[in-house]
Image (cartoon, helix red, strand yellow):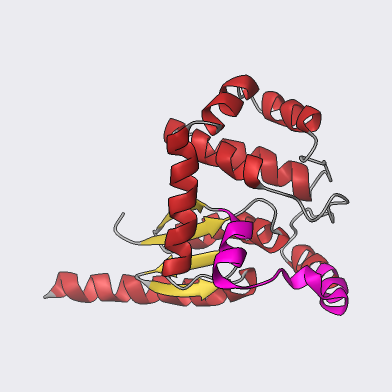
Amino acid sequence: MSKSVEFFFDYGSPATYLAYKRLPDIARAHGAEVKYRPFLLGGLLKAVGNSAPTDLPAKREWMWQDLARIAKRYDIPFKVNSAFPVNTLVLMRAATAVEPTGRLLEFSDAIFGALWEKDRNLGDLHVLREVVTGAGFDFEQIAADSQKADVKDRLRVSTEEAADRGAFGAPTFFVAGEMHFGQDRLEYVQLALAGAAKQNVSQGAV
């Protein structure tokens, strides 16, 4: 599969959750692979001097309403997390630790679902342990692996890479080197993938 879309994600972003639910079908329709890239949104915002959209009360109120409308349109289960904003350092280190095992999607399904479908407070380690264990993972092993220097370094490098490539928030997508930001820009991800498909066909005909 030659086409791909890089998906920089952080579990604490509700817009990223909606993109996570929609992106696999979009990629599949265009014969593309999704490359999941865990990174730390808080670290990115600090690095580029950006702030969360929820910092502005009026924008925060609008955002929750808009996300609910989008979730309804695409039939995606969605609840506002009562513990929002969530400090995701522990979660994203855990995702980075799980990634080499080939089970990142299973882990992400559990974490995104707990946060944005079931309104679980994953800042509470007892709740996090319950969610992770319930999804069939060894919580203690993941917790231990998350503290390893190489895991911390990989998350830091991924976050720095996103900033260096122009990212300023989540979700951020890259298709053939072109950046797209926001779950409401998935239409342009589709167009970019379609363009990549046409280019592949053209190259194959030469």
Q: Which residue is drawn at 25% across and 70% down?
A: 200
Range covered by the magenta-colored residues? 40-64
Which sits in the foreground, 201 or 135?
135
Instruction: Quadrant for the C terminus, please.
Output: bottom left
Mainly helix, strand or loop, the magenta region? helix
**Occupied quadrant, residue 175:** bottom left
Of all residues shown, which one is farthest toward the left? 206
Q: Position of residue 197 (x, y in %)?
A: 33, 70
51 part of magenta stretch: yes
Horizontal side of residue 180 vs 84, given as left or right: left
Q: Position of residue 41 (x, y in %)?
A: 61, 58
Q: Which residue is drawn at 64% across and 45% down?
A: 89
Asked whether residue 193 appears in the rendered view, the answer is yes
205 part of magenta stretch: no
**Does 93 sit above or below residue 25?**
above
Instruction: Quadrant for the N terminus, please.
Output: bottom left
Which sits in the foreground, 148 or 15?
148
Which sits in the foreground, 9 or 92?
92
Which sits in the foreground, 183 or 200?
183
**Occupied quadrant, residue 33:** bottom left
Horizontal side of residue 88 vs 99, given as left or right: right
Q: Residue at x 69, y 58 (%)?
A: 13
**Does 4 sit above or below residue 88?**
below
**Does 77 sit above or below residue 96?**
below
Q: Position of residue 24 (x, y in %)?
A: 53, 55
Q: Position of residue 155 (x, y in %)?
A: 49, 47
